[in-house]
Image (cartoon, rainbow, N blue to C red):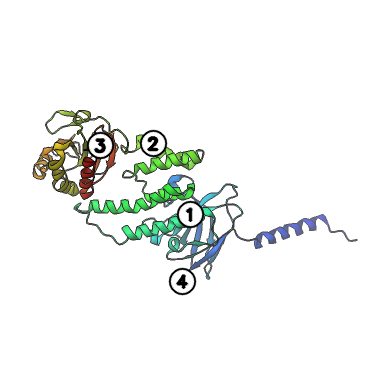
């Protein structure tokens, strides 16, 4: 019998293992359609915090793959963790920052979030120029199916409410129209996040609601998501980050809160305590400015008619104006007929102390309070505000 030297045996084992490694299946692979240019790479990005999710120039690059001329690609350097991990696949031309995400238009987005689970291969197809929109996974897991469903909702909402829209906001005339369209778009994502039982799809929806991390108009959504997930996954670091961000001390006064009994510096130079001036049925706290076109329209076309019809039935309006010029403020009040209700301002412009206390930065804004000072609605304008007041006054008669 011939004995193989130990050195040769070790070499044979190493070669065999190398061959097995080279020809073992890639756990994330796929094909891009529409490859008509060279030097396309695809990256795996791992967001390390909630704020890095769906955010351009953040996260950790954990692997990259050259897209071959036939569009094929594969990844092998994947996380070894046994826990599922959210990753972002990003396509990029060689030479560009791999962490640059196109976030302003989901139809053209060059990235897609997926959930990676050790030992579960993912086979992907997508079009180069519509990467997120066309992204598919062969036999997706339940959570990846939820992410694909969310992608479809995101795409449809954007197409319906925002795509191709051009609002005249330089003069403020269509500012509320734009805000309403954004809110309608966000509402579709919020509905998904509130209904899904999977954490990662919910958090992707939350980030897509506002990539800029601006939730002033929908703070109740943050709070509801924190309350939901801290019961289900209280130890998840992203849930902890979410709950820190959704602390009420960081957010505007919420629906269901008692509006704080603050002092209003009045046009008449004295001060007014809100508690002492609440309407017997309803109070509108109106935040406006003389230079704000939609605010001025609201004064003339909405608040004056509401006041005339319902003030004697128990409606009160208390206005706070973001002003620095007293003359312009007084002139606007007179021109709009807004001298019928309480008018106040610190005359400190953007540094308005009152708005800081209620943690509001954007106008026009309003809070609608019941007779106890509890916020029953917020940021309702135009015909919707008129209908709300009419309905509420009838309901409590």
Q: Earlier in the sequence, mark 2 or mark 3?
A: 2
x, y (%) of residue 184? Answer: 32, 53
In three-dimensional space, the C-alpha distance between marks 1 and 4, rounded to whole angstroms, equals: 31 Å
Q: Which residue is the site of mark 4?
A: 36
Q: Earlier in the sequence, mark 3 or mark 4?
A: 4
* Left or right of 381 on screen, residue 37: right
Q: Which of marks 4 and 1 precedes in the sequence?
A: 4
User: Badge 1: few (under 14), some or many (20 or more) residues near its Cα, within 10 Å?
Assistant: many
Q: Residues within 10 Å of mark 3 (few under 14, many from 20)?
A: many
**Above or below, comparing residue 353 to residue 167 in the picture:** above
Q: Which residue is disc 3 drawn over? A: 369
User: Under tag 1, what secondary structure?
Assistant: helix
The residue that disc 1 covers is: 146
Q: Earlier in the sequence, mark 2 or mark 1?
A: 1
Q: What x and y, as percent, mark residue 371?
A: 24, 33
Pick whichever, 203 or 289, lies toward us. 203
Distance in Å between CA atoms under marks 3 and 1: 38 Å
Secondary structure, mark 4, is: loop
Q: Secondary structure at mark 3?
A: strand
Earlier-in-chain disc, 3 versus 1: 1
Which residue bears the numbered disc 2? 247
In the displayed structure image, the side of residue 371 where residue 194 appears, left or right: right
Q: Earlier in the sequence, mark 2 or mark 4?
A: 4
The CA distance from mark 2 to mark 3 is 22 Å
Q: Give 347 or 14, whichever is nearer the viewer.
A: 347
Closest to the camera, between mark 1 and mark 4, is 1
Q: Nearer the viewer, mark 3 or mark 4?
A: 3
């Amino acid at each position: 019998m011939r004995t193989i030297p130990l050195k040769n045996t070790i070499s044979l084992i190493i070669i065999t293992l190398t061959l097995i490694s080279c020809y073992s299946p890639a756990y994330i692979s796929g094909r891009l359609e529409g490859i008509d240019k060279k030097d396309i790479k695809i990256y795996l990005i791992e967001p390390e915090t909630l704020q890095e999710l769906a955010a351009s120039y953040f996260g950790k690059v954990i692997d990259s793959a050259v897209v071959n001329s036939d569009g094929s690609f594969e990844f092998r350097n994947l996380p070894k963790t046994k826990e599922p991990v959210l990753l972002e696949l990003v396509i990029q031309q060689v030479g560009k920052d791999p962490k640059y995400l196109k976030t302003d238009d989901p139809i053209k987005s060059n990235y897609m979030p997926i959930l990676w689970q050790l030992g579960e291969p993912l086979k992907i197809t997508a079009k180069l120029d519509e990467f997120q929109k066309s992204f598919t996974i062969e036999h997706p897991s339940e959570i990846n199916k939820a992410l694909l469903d969310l992608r479809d909702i995101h795409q449809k909402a954007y197409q319906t409410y925002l795509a191709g829209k051009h609002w005249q906001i330089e003069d403020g005339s269509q500012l509320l129209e734009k805000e309403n369209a954004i809110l309608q778009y966000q509402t579709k994502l919020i509905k998904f996040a509130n209904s899904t039982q999977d954490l990662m799809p919910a958090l992707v929806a939350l980030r897509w609601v506002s990539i800029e991390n601006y939730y002033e108009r929908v703070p109740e959504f943050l709070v509801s998501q924190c309350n939901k997930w801290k019961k289900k996954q209280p130890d998840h670091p992203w849930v902890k980050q979410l709950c820190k961000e959704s602390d009420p001390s960081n957010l505007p006064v919420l629906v269901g809160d008692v509006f704080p009994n603050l002092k209003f510096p009045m046009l008449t130079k004295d001060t007014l305590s809100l508690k002492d001036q609440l309407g017997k049925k309803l109070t509108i706290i109106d935040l406006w400015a003389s230079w704000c076109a939609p605010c001025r329209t609201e004064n003339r076309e909405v608040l004056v008619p509401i006041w005339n019809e319902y003030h004697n039935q128990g409606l009160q309006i208390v206005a706070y104006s973001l002003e620095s010029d007293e003359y312009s403020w007084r002139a606007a009040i007179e021109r709009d007929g807004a001298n019928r209700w309480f008018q106040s301002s610190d005359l400190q412009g953007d540094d308005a102390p009152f708005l800081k206390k209620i943690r509001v930065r954007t106008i026009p804004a309003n809070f609608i309070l019941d007779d106890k000072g509890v916020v029953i609605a917020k940021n309702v304008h135009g015909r919707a505000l008129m209908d709300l007041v009419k309905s509420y006054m009838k309901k409590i008669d």
